[in-house]
Image (spheres, coloured by chain):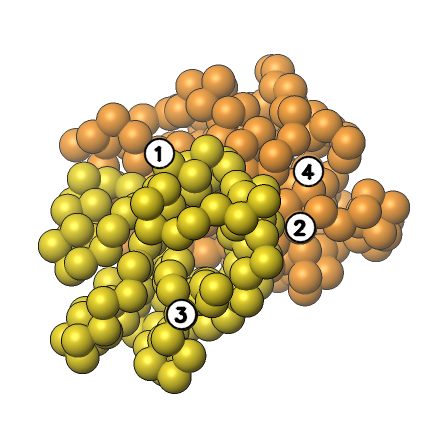
Amino acid sequence: MKVLVADDSRVMRQLVIRTLRQAGYGGLEVLHAADGREAVDVTLREQPHLVLSDWDLPLLSGIDALGVLRGAGVTVPFGFVTAETSREVRDRAAAAGAQFVIAKPFGVEDFQEALAGLLPARR
Amino acid sequence: MSVHLPHPKQVRDLFAQLLSREVRLGPGSAVTPGERTPASVALYVDDDGRPRAALAWDLHLSVRAAAALGVVPLRHAEVSIKGGSLTESLRENLHEVADVAARLFNDGGATHVRLDALHAAGWALPDEARAAALTLGRREDLAMEIGGYGPGRLSVVLL
């Protein structure tokens, strides 16, 4: 199962991956993107089962990357992992087709709750 | 709308969850960036780009928080403390800490702020950043201890 983690911070990508594994999602093939354009390119090429993206990304923001993908007919489950957690951000994320917004800092239970029903947990 | 000073409990809870470590907090002395007292300063601006808040970490807490985020062994991080500046890798980690710490100011319908810049300890510190850290008035000066990494000082300043 492929998961794309899009964040310009290498350490944050590592934290997301570690927390995913702690949440029971082991054995994943993890793809990385450091900016929004790379996130779109990797998604179109690799067709991951899930995209986890920061809100603010270089070159193309996370919300704009989601817009590009949805506009291209890509229906991959997409969630934001971000420190931006205002009502406006959540509403924009939902309107653009995101399934969830996980707030930084996050815990294992945040991923378990968000991903229940989207990805089967593997232990 | 205005920016609120976070309650110390909010500060402790955010750092504890972000770093996945026990964090203890108590009253401390002000972080005062200077040539012999390197410190990291994060500046936060509102949606109009106006400076509204700052966080300042002394060198010890800058290194320890950055190391804790990346699960860098303490003995490796201590080299930065002795050297008086953060490595590039620790600077990146601290940037992420500062970015997430914007949440301290954004809860409860307050004016939205975001991280504008992080000036890491031991690197060039613009006068504006130094002045922000030294601003009198609405501020909290805290002593923080990160479990497994050790203590340092954090100042939370409204501008």
Q: Which residue is mark 1?
A: B105
Dot 3 and dot 1 within a common chain: no
Mark 1 or 2, closer to the camera: 2
Colour chain B is painted in: orange
| Mark 4 → mark 1, Cα distance in angstroms | 20 Å
Which residue is rendered at x = 17% and y = 76% of the image?
A73
Identify which amino acid the numbered label 4 is placed on: Leu
Identify which amino acid the numbered label 2 is placed on: Gly
| Mark 1 → mark 2, Cα distance in angstroms | 24 Å
Q: Is residue B46 visible?
A: no
Q: Which residue is mark 2?
A: B70
Q: Which residue is mark 3?
A: A48
Q: Residues within 10 Å of mark 4 (few under 14, many from 20)?
A: many
Mark 4 or 3, closer to the camera: 3
Mark 3 or 1, closer to the camera: 3
Q: Residues within 10 Å of mark 1 (few under 14, many from 20)?
A: many
| Mark 3 → mark 1, Cα distance in angstroms | 35 Å
Image position, residue B32 (x, y; %): 62, 37
Identify which amino acid the numbered label 3 is placed on: Pro
Image position, residue A54 (x, y; %): 38, 58
Give whichever of discs 4 and 1 has the lower sequence position: 4
Q: Which mark is residue B30?
A: none
Q: Chain of mark 2?
A: B
SS at circle 3: loop
Image position, residue B54 (x, y; %): 45, 40
SS at circle 1: helix
Q: Which residue is mark 4?
A: B61
Q: Chain of mark 1?
A: B
Q: Nearer the viewer, residue B71 or A42?
A: A42
Image position, residue B152 (x, y; %): 70, 31
| Mark 4 → mark 2, Cα distance in angstroms | 14 Å
